[in-house]
Image (cartoon, helix red, strand yellow):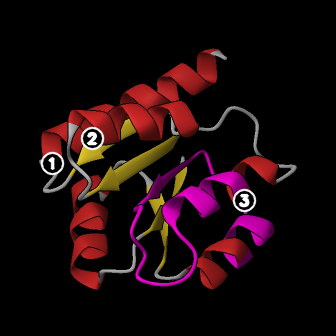
């Protein structure tokens, strides 16, 4: 299974990657341009997307880019974000993210969420 991590903070990306190491193959994009290229050129089983990417494009913009891809077929799109209120969670899920985690994320919670998301996607 292959996951694309879209996170502009290199330390956060490294932590997410370390937490999922051994369970998933992963690519990391640190900005929207590299994310869009990877989405275009690869097939992923799921995505982990930060909301605040520190540039003109947000994680919400990337959500819509992923969903517009012809390769997207009910793939999980998980946001891992510093926006951590109940209202934020409701908003991001209502916009189309399949799962939501607030930073700082714990290893067991990230792994559990990704595993659940991938299993749900397999079932259709």
Does the CB distance between marks 1 and 2 fall below 8 Å?
A: yes
The residue shown at (81%, 54%) is: 69
Residue at the disc numbered 1: 107
The residue shown at (44%, 44%) is: 78
Q: For the view shown, which residue lies furthest in the top direction?
A: 123
Question: What label sits on residue 25 in the rendered view?
Answer: none
Q: For the view shown, which residue lies furthest in the front direction?
A: 87
Q: Secondary structure at mark 3?
A: helix
Q: Secondary structure at mark 1?
A: helix
First reached walking from the N terminus: tag 1 or tag 3: 3
Which of the pair 66/87 is nearer the observer? 87
Residue 114 visible to the viewer: no
Query: Per the image, is 93 magenta?
Result: no
Give the answer, above or below, for where 95 lies relative to 116: below
- Residue 52 is left or right of residue 61, and the answer is left
Region rendered in magenta: 37-64
Residue at the disc numbered 2: 111
Quadrant position of the C terminus in the picture: top right
Counting from the top left corner in percent of width and height, residue 81 is at: 30, 56
Give the answer, above or below, for where 74 lies relative to 1: above
Counting from the top left corner in percent of width and height, residue 64 is at: 69, 53
The residue shown at (39%, 69%) is: 52
Residue 40 visible to the viewer: yes
Does the CB distance between marks 1 and 3 fall below 8 Å?
A: no
Residue at the disc numbered 3: 65
């Amino acid at each position: 299974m292959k996951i694309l991590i879209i996170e502009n903070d290199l330390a956060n990306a490294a932590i997410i990657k370390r937490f999922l190491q051994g369970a998933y193959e992963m690519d990391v994009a640190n900005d929207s341009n590299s994310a869009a290229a990877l989405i275009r050129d690869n097939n992923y089983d799921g995505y982990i997307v930060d909301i605040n990417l520190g540039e003109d494009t947000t994680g919400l913009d990337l959500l819509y880019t992923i969903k517009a891809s012809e390769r997207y077929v009910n793939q999980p799109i998980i946001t891992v974000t510093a926006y951590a209120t109940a209202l934020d969670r409701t908003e991001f899920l209502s916009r189309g993210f399949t799962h939501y985690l607030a930073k700082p994320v714990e290893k067991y919670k990230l792994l559990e969420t990704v595993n659940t998301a991938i299993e749900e996607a397999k079932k259709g």
